[in-house]
Amino acid sequence: MINFKSLLTTLMGGKTLPRTLDNTAAESTFIEDVDTGHLISSAQGPIAVPTIDTIEGSLFSPADIDLYQLESECQAFFKFSVAENLLLSVSSLSLFLFDEMGKGLAAGIGEVGFNFSENETFYLGISDGLNPLNSAGEVLLSPEGEVNTGTLTGWQDPGLVIPIFTHYKIAIEIETQAVPEPLEIGGQGLAEGTVNI
């Protein structure tokens, strides 16, 4: 029987694939090392974003959840989306964002985004349809928009699972804060919020 975790570790051989030496590569990738954990204490990282703009890993069954620790290098709206793959239905993969304490921030199916400050620590989780739970056993975050109080303490019980290997890539994009355009009044450019007396 093929051990996919060992095979991926052997083939990939590390965590981060850097840009090429001549800087022609458009991306830098963080590769899941063996199998990342599903709670804050067992997340892989830290991953500096947007320097790292792709996360690549695998879910080894519908019960497998991967959680990554990220560090924002700038203040921006970060968007995470599961890259299209002919062998993968992205409609079933859910993405979850948590703050450094494990409080739920946002979730979505196939993509999720949130505004982060510079040097902020946060966590990105991916699952095949399982939702995170708080200490009361309530759904902490759901891709449908449910956000409860508390912090991440576990995930829904998937019940009986059949091992299914799912390889994924998560693309990371940023949208920087736009600088407001000056107002045009009587042909004069005035900075927003100023009054001409």
Image (spheres, helix red, strand yellow):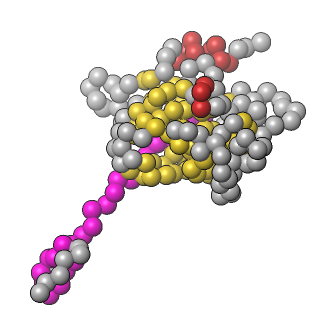
Query: Which residue: 19% across, 77% down?
Result: 194
**Is residue 130 visible in this depiction of the protein?**
no
Q: Where is residue 120? Give x, y as percent.
A: 42, 41
Residue 119 or 164: which is nearer the viewer? 119
| Residue 70 visible, this angle | yes
Q: Above or below — where is 163 with respect to 114? A: above
Q: Position of residue 162 (x, y in %)?
A: 83, 30
Task: Point out the image quarter for the N terminus.
Answer: top right
Residue 110 located within the stretch drawn in magenta:
no
Quadrant in which the C terminus is drawn: bottom left
User: In this orientation, which residue lies closer to the viewer: 100 or 155?
Assistant: 100
The residue at the point 46 percent across, 28 percent down is 46
Q: Is residue 7 left or right of residue 100?
A: right
Task: Tell me what residue is drawn at x 46 percent, y 42 percent.
Answer: 172
Instruction: Name which residue lies at 30% across and 32% down.
Output: 24
Occupied quadrant, residue 53: top left
Q: Which residues are magenta?
A: 165-191
Q: Is residue 7 above or below residue 90?
A: above
